[in-house]
Image: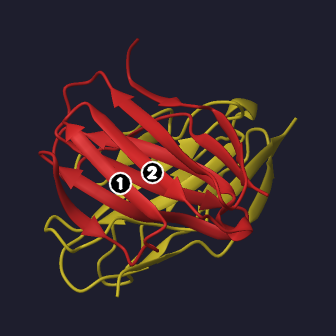
Chain colours: A yellow, B red
Amino acid sequence: AQRVTQPEKLLSVFKGAPVELKCNYSYSGSPELFWYVQYSRQRLQLLLRHISRESIKGFTADLNKGETSFHLKKPFAQEEDSAMYYCALSGRNYGQNFVFGPGTRLSVLP
Amino acid sequence: ETGVTQTPRHLVMGMTNKKSLKCEQHLGHNAMYWYKQSAKKPLELMFVYSLEERVENNSVPSRFSPECPNSSHLFLHLHTLQPEDSALYLCASSQEFAGELFFGEGSRLTVL
């Protein structure tokens, strides 16, 4: 069965420090991986997806099929990065459900 | 209105009531989704409609009944709910099945 794990419920870093939000998944096949973010009082929105290979707001994520991971990284955290981050997985065929991880709350301290 | 809008934003109902949640998307998308978000569990996919046809139903109790009359509207009909059904219900849409999800702000449901 598809599953996404995010081992940290809460991650606190100081402004300017590097940040890495961990995500591991289990899936039989070639999934599509996403990171979604929810800022305070805003709706859940896409941050990035692995197929686009873009850097959004300084964040990057590399899909490692060998380790089944899709960690989110940023070299220098900003206070405005404080939010709830969800890793998500999707299959492309009907019956392959969208699955979200439990989320990691990132707190960037001044 | 743009994006995905959900009404009502807050709903309180008794266990014997019948109510409905409404979702409307103004993005021209072809797929719509219902998710449940509760404090103790991650986002749970409930239903998926693609081109107005239900394509996913994740073992959701029959007291939740979805309806998708057209590609822009999605309803979740609620009846004889239990207190443990209290949660935030999120609607989302995507241009294609399994593509980027655009979420609404959610409907906060409290079952007394």
Placement of A67 over or under B90, stated as above or below: below
Q: Mark 2 lies on which chain?
A: B
User: Residue at position x 45%, y 51% from top?
Assistant: B77
Instruction: Specify few, some or many for label 1: CA neighbours under 10 Å numbering under 14, 14-19, or 20 or more.
Output: many
Q: Is mark 2 on a helix, strand or loop?
A: strand
Q: Give yes or no for contact between labels 2 and 1 (Cβ–Cβ under 8 Å).
A: yes
Query: Residue B12's x, y, as percent?
Result: 73, 44
Mark sitting on residue B77: 2
Q: In this view, does B40 lie to the left or right of B3?
A: right
Residue in view at x 38 percent, y 15 percent: B2
Q: Is B98 or B15 nearer to us in this picture?
A: B15
Numbered circle sitting on residue B66:
1
Give the left or right position of residue A96, taking residue B16 as reference.
left
Position of residue B109 measured from the top left corner of the image (x, y, whole percent): 67, 48
Q: Which residue lies furthest to the front in this view?
A: B16
Give whichever of discs 2 and 1 has the lower sequence position. Answer: 1
Measured Cα–Cα span from mark 2 to mark 1: 6 Å
In the rendered structure, the answer to whether residue B103 lies left or right of residue A1 reads right
Report the label total.
2
The answer to whether residue A59 is seen in the rendering is no
Res B22 quadrant in image: top left
Query: At 69% across and 59% down in the image, what residue appears?
Result: B86
Q: In this view, does A95 lie above or below A60?
A: below
In the figure, residue A81 lies in which quadrant? top right
Q: Which of A33 and B84 is in front in this view?
A: B84
